[in-house]
Amino acid sequence: MVGFEKAANAITKASLASPNNAKTRLSPDSVLNLAQGDPTAFEPYWRNLGDKCTMVISGSDLMSYLSDMGNICWFLEPELAEAIRHLHIEVGNAISKDRHIVIGTGSTQLYQAALYALSSPDSSEPISVVSAAPYYSQYPPQTDYLRSGLYKWAGDAFTFDNDGPFIEIVNSPNNPDGTIREAVVVNKGKGWLIHDLAYYWPQYTPITHVADHDIMLFTLSKCTGHAGSRIGWALVKDAEVARKITNFIEFNSIGVSKESQLRAAKIIGVICDGCQDFESSKSDTNFFEYAQRLMAERWKKLREAVRSSEVFSLAEYPLDFCNFIGEFTKSNPAFAWLQCKEDVDCEKLLRELKVMVRGGKQFEADEMYARVSMLSRDESFNLLLEKLSGIKGGGTINGKRM
């Protein structure tokens, strides 16, 4: 196993080190690292735009800590705040008007900040944090990493029976299985909700409603694919909660990179411009149409490979009307929640194919499941299809017994 992980990490590092993150040449025997959701699938779109997102920053620009002292989130660049509000209006996936926007170094930092904001320093014991299984595998370690006396991970929301206060994380569409989620725990007003909406974008799921929750977390990485910019944002109703979230980030990192913020504002602005002509966009100018077609095509190919394998199965997602696209569509999640038909460890089976994934147990699910990223570069995705198609019933790979 150690050798397998070293090989996978070597491939990842080689890819990142190559010029402009160009794809690494893969052989049929290559190890695929699909355990992470690195969103490199969208690189061709941004490459084809040429210099439309290019910006120049001089040495004397952006030197101050401060951005907007009249705002609760004083380190939020006004250009980015305006771009975020405009984006949500164009897509129609969340209310941004009259909401406080707090920026973070990805939604990971905002997750910790939100837990801090909803916890009470006067409580005699840490508040319980739960999410419905299968839940995002990083929620438990992120919650308990600091060993905070304010909050602690308490597991599956379906089995939570404590009468005390709680924080429930509602991840919708859900990572890992792509399902649409609602809150599970109801506890006589003693609970708080954090809605993690990282994947509530048209390329992954139909936009059926405008989300309107107390705390909503989003991230540029899953929206546009720009994971390296490390930009996330929270839309927050309550001013005091927004202030506490801001305080956490201030104490933690004294704000967020202005260069990243302005780059994000530029990128989001280009996306919003493309949304203006969605009606006539059968070209690749509209990012969300491009990304939705890409994900739909990948899921079609994956389902064909799974049927060919005779070993795996995938859930079907209901047809729903997407308000953004204006037609009925199905979900095309960022991850495939792959299930082995036979009673075997799905992660272990995929390791036999040299495919590195996250097994079901990491999500408090059965080992028959594994999460596979759908966001890799084309060459990696196509090799995944070949590897999956090579598995047949009876425990053979390309005719050879495992």
Image (cartoon, rainbow, N blue to C red):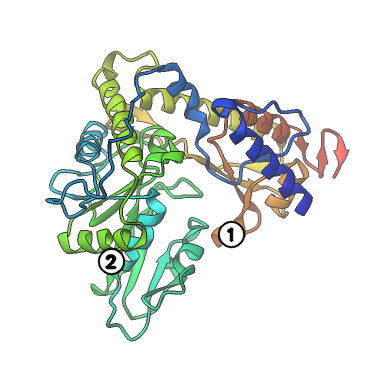
The foreground one among 397 and 254 is: 254
Q: Which residue is mark 2?
A: 117
- Kind of residue indicated by mark 1: Gln
- Compared to residue 309, the image places residue 116 above or below, namely below
Splitting the image into 4 quarters, where does residue 267 fall? top left
Alpha-carbon span between mark 2 and mark 1: 27 Å
The foreground one among 60 and 142 is: 60
- Label disc, if present, on residue 362 of the rendered structure: 1
Which residue: 41% across, 16% down?
50
Which residue: 23% across, 57% down?
214
* Mark with earlier residue (2, 1): 2
Asked if residue 184 shows in the view, the reply is no
- Compared to residue 160, the image places residue 201 above or below, namely above
Residue that protrudes farthest toward the right in the picture = 400
In the image, 28: left or right of 75?
right
Residue that protrudes farthest toward the bottom in the picture = 124
The crowding category of the residue bearing disc 2, from other C-alpha atoms within 10 Å (few below 14, some 14 to 19, many at least 20), is many
Mark 2 touches mark 1? (CB < 8 Å): no
**Marks 2 and 1: which is nearer the front?**
2
In the image, 41: left or right of 349?
left
Label 2 sits on a secondary structure element that is helix
| Number of numbered labels in the structure image | 2
x%, y% of residue 386? 71, 29
The crowding category of the residue bearing disc 1, from other C-alpha atoms within 10 Å (few below 14, some 14 to 19, many at least 20), is some
x%, y% of residue 154? 45, 72
Label 1 sits on a secondary structure element that is helix
- Kind of residue indicated by mark 2: Ala
